[in-house]
Image: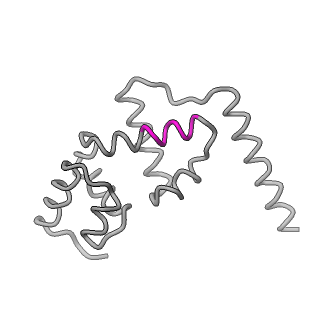
Amino acid sequence: MKPWTAAEERRAIRAARDGLSLAEIAEDHGRTKQAIATRLTEWGGWKRIAGFEEEAKTWFHQWQNGASWSTISASSGMSRSMVTLRVKRWCERQGVPLQRSAEAERQARSGAQRRRRRRERMAS
């Protein structure tokens, strides 16, 4: 893991403010999307950047419709904890409760139960 220089950090922040996606910023800097998101989170400015807001909103709606945090994390290329943190913060700022519909919750639970049974069968 290479250390961040002040100039590189400023370029990443500027790029995020200009609306570049995490993937584009990561490619420009030769770092992972997770590293870029973490750095911007530490800086505290990511919540003011429109692209991050839109991404968190999209993840929230995916989760609300029954997707698991792990599935969303895998498709975004970010850690599960970073995805959930950003969605929770988005919900707080929007005043939206972090909850699913009863149908989406049933769907998510049945998927989790199927995965658990599959793992148990494979282990035996």
Q: Residue 55: horizontal and vertical position, in percent?
A: 40, 44
Q: Residue furthest bottom?
A: 2
Residue 102 located left or right of residue 116: left
The answer to whether residue 23 is left or right of residue 103 is left
Say if 3 sits above or below 94 in the image: below
Does 77 sit left or right of 42 as displayed? Answer: right
Q: Quadrant of residue 13?
A: bottom left
Furthest toward the left, the residue is: 7
Give the percent coordinates (x, y) of residue 27. Answer: 30, 69
**Magenta residues: mostly which secondary structure?**
helix
Q: Is residue 24 magenta?
A: no
- For the residue pair 33 and 4, the one nearer the viewer reads as 33
How are the residues colored? one colour
- Determine the residue positioned at 42% across, 37% down: 57
State yes or no: residue 58 in magenta.
yes
In the rendered image of this protein, does residue 97 appear above or below residue 3?
above
Residue at 20% across, 56% down: 15
- In the rendered image, residue 115, in percent from the top left (x then y), is placed at 76, 54
The image quarter containing residue 14 is bottom left
- The residue positioned 31% from the left and 45% from the top of the image is 51
124 horizontally vs 60: left or right? right
Quarter assignment of residue 92 = top left
Q: Which residues are magenta?
A: 57-64
Nearer the observer, 108 or 62: 62
Residue at the outermost top position: 95
Image location (x, y in percent) of residue 45: 22, 45
Q: Quadrant of the C terminus?
A: bottom right
| Count of picture labels | 0
Quadrant in which the N terminus is drawn = bottom left
Q: Residue at x 45, y 48 (%)?
A: 83
